[in-house]
Image (spheres, coloured by chain):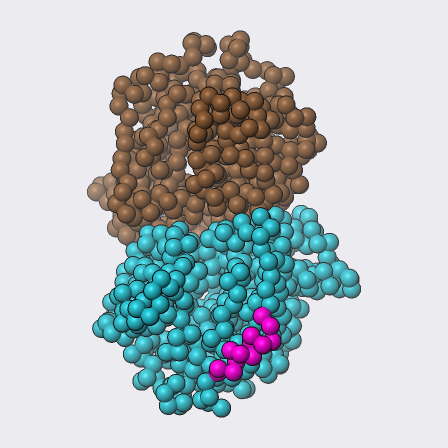
Chain colours: A brown, B cyan
Amino acid sequence: MAAETKIPYKIYLTEEEMPTAWYNLRADMKVKPAPLLNPGTGKPLTAEELTPIFCEELVKQELDNDTPYIEIPQEIRDFYKMFRPSPLVRAYCLEEKLKTPAKIYYKFEGNNTSGSHKLNSAIAQAYYAKKQGLKGVTTETGAGQWGTALSMACAYLGLDLKVYMVKVSYEQKPFRREVMRTYGASVVPSPSDTTEVGRKILAEFPGTTGSLGCAISEAVEVATKNPGYRYVLGSVLNQVLLHQSVIGLETKAALDKYGIKPDIIIGCAGGGSNLGGLIAPFMGEKLRGEADYRIIAVEPASCPSFTRGTFAYDFCDTGKICPLAKMYTLGSSFIPSANHAGGLRFHGMSSTLSQLYHDGYMEATSVEQTSVFEAAEMFARVEGILPAPESSHAIRAAIDEALKCKETGEEKTIVFGLTGTGYFDLVAYQKYNDGEMSDYIPTDEEIAASVAKLPKVGE
Amino acid sequence: MAAETKIPYKIYLTEEEMPTAWYNLRADMKVKPAPLLNPGTGKPLTAEELTPIFCEELVKQELDNDTPYIEIPQEIRDFYKMFRPSPLVRAYCLEEKLKTPAKIYYKFEGNNTSGSHKLNSAIAQAYYAKKQGLKGVTTETGAGQWGTALSMACAYLGLDLKVYMVKVSYEQKPFRREVMRTYGASVVPSPSDTTEVGRKILAEFPGTTGSLGCAISEAVEVATKNPGYRYVLGSVLNQVLLHQSVIGLETKAALDKYGIKPDIIIGCAGGGSNLGGLIAPFMGEKLRGEADYRIIAVEPASCPSFTRGTFAYDFCDTGKICPLAKMYTLGSSFIPSANHAGGLRFHGMSSTLSQLYHDGYMEATSVEQTSVFEAAEMFARVEGILPAPESSHAIRAAIDEALKCKETGEEKTIVFGLTGTGYFDLVAYQKYNDGEMSDYIPTDEEIAASVAKLPKVGE
């Protein structure tokens, strides 16, 4: 262990050094991400069409491909100070364990009660809803990270929140549910009899344990039918990537403080909220030709949208009520195997990241879940943080890159995003500890079957 | 919210500013804490009698009433850097919520995977065991904070660990158990058939769900019967308070950095590990006549050792196999009501803190659990941290003091210890959220009955 090094174990920015504006990656993209389409008309969605669903200011941010920096309102900056700046950690212990010449850093976003980076966008979305004079917001949650983050933000601002939680998670993750309730949210198992779509699904499939697609449909229905409510979403959207850029901006400021230039930047990718935020300022430099970095997206082998998906317009939800987005997708009817415990189950990917990947600005790799949990456990033991399964995909890839450096003797600097903690994922850890976890890779036929069902619009 | 203030939301020390030595409060006490007694002979325990149970260096620390500063070995300081310095947080949002002129600070010890301050002593005890060339250590755990912390420390040092976990917790807190297993600990539900005492208890009380006293007995038996093993303990002992002084030393350094002098220092008190650590340097100044502070211990009304106990020699464990300690005690046969969900269930208290309380250097107060959870929920919503029930006793008392300031208009500075997070206490939160939590205060007769059974030695 490098006790005498000049680079501390944890680099913290001071409050004065914290970002005062989010960075909008799209402003520096020569090829902009394709617009969201109205599934009915096949035409790009206008602000007028989006404002009944989303808050006005968020619609502006969603459609703004030109403004590079958008000021973070003071109220949000104050909230950020409660859990930010997050530490950029030098993984001295992991380096020693691996006996690698690589220098490994990770940006840890788990030191807040929601346990993940989701809070960065939750407070922004809740703030704009409050500012618009709304009574409340609705959302869906699967594993519960986003719902918890949004509960915290809404409690802080005194905003009403209704969370539609996929029924199987509601029942199997009672503690997540209780955190949300402690923060004053109303948590409804989905499908429920509180919405038309819920009642319809319950009638058609009695005993169903729900799906994210159904929960989205219920949350959107409630938001659009109740005056004073809007719907909010924790990933995929451009606005979410914008808010999450605070991760990358802090990371870059911390590295700059010590004159460190990373060679490789690694992030796990589900819908893209963490990856898009972490890489934002680095990708900006790359797009402007000011610097070069290897940027790697890591996804589960069981849900490989970047590495085995198709770049096409698709629905964001399995219920097919949401706008169409152009993205790398496995098809909205693709559902990862039930034995996949590691999160990142979304069939598609952020349009912005999809365009960047398509244009060759980043790489993608997929990893199998037992090797992800193996990396997670090693990391927990040497670095002292129990990582979320999602984050552990990035850990796996970072370890693999560090081991390559060991072979070649290269002293590369690797930065990865540690999105959150695994406190609420212990059922999955137990499966791994008991040797009951297996891997699953979809066949080409399975992927082809769901890709064949892609909508024909926007071609 | 005071956005423009000069005092940041979170005061972090740099690594260079972190303490390099623990502070041994006993060195400044005119009346030293009474020695541990051998229950057989009634005579003070010698180092020779203690070393078959505890590591040699820890026995030295346990018996050292004179050395004021004991250097923290570099290896432990390196480990501390993985999760320390912990932030001293200015509770701006809580102040605004209460509309109090008081200035409230809290030292937050929950930002590590074990979720509490226990890790400060766990790594120290594991380090000395490793240095002595031992193979491993044994311990007991109830709620699991201590067991988790020790698992992390042992994993880091490659030390074997056997945890006897009270059976009812083992079954009701499977996630705590899984964290320990992920860190490589062997976790045994107690009573078990792996020890003589366990087999005896199982034969006598088939179907028992265990007790901390029984788990201690099993852990001690295994440590003393297996060459290369020793027993370690997470609270009550002098050595634990010594290691935990890092909390208070950091707190004082952070306050000094901004020229802040607290008026009131508040800590929750179970066995005394957090309270003793938090107050150490402040109490030192008070003992030396250099400064004055109001120091308040907060305990549950259902287990009120300071406020309603007796200052006398008693067993530390219900099984009556441990040494006798002079302390404020409700009697080792006292068991808090089963409906008490808020932790801090120990019948006694650290000898050092007991002596200081007896000599008038600190105050004590007791609070009821529904008011504790009410404070916890308010705190979670405005400060964004879901607190452990134990820590929430201190939150309750801090809020009460801040509300007094509101009445009198006094701008007092209040510092309290936030020992940990409530991620593994959501069954208790659920009870509170569902309105199913009640209070319980033992009657004078109940306390008198268990105090009547105090041992007659050492009088």
- Number of labels in the image equals 0
The residue shown at (27%, 60%) is B158
**Horizontal and vertical percent position of residue A355:** 42, 21
Q: Please give the range of residues in magenta.
A: B442-454
Quarter of the image holding residue B37? bottom left
Foreground residue, A361 or A207?
A: A207
Q: Nearer the viewer, residue A372 or B325?
A: B325
In this view of the protein, can residue B358 be seen by the observer? yes
Verify whether residue B299 appears in magenta: no
The quadrant of the image that shows the N terminus of chain A is bottom left
Q: In terms of depth relative to the viewer, which is nearer, A411 or A166?
A: A166
Q: Nearer the viewer, residue A242 or A286?
A: A242
Q: Residue B245's spot in the image, x, y percent?
A: 49, 70
* Residue for point 52% across, 67% down: B336
Specify whether residue B445 is painted magenta.
Answer: yes
Residue at image location 35% in from the left, 16% down from the top: A451
Percent across and percent down for residue A449 are: 32, 16
In the depicted structure, whether residue B91 falls above or below residue A403: below
Question: Taking A222 as reference, is A452 above or below it?
Answer: above
Which residue is at a point 33% across and 52% down the rendered structure image? B182
User: Percent from the top left, x then y, of residue B355?
Assistant: 54, 81
Would residue B183 be found to the left or right of residue A255 on screen?
Answer: left
Residue B127 visible to the viewer: no
Task: Specify whether A342 is left or right of B422.
Answer: left
Task: Locate the C terminus of chain A and report the quarter of the image it occupies.
Answer: top left
Type of secondary structure dominating the magenta stretch: helix
Residue positioned most to the right: B408
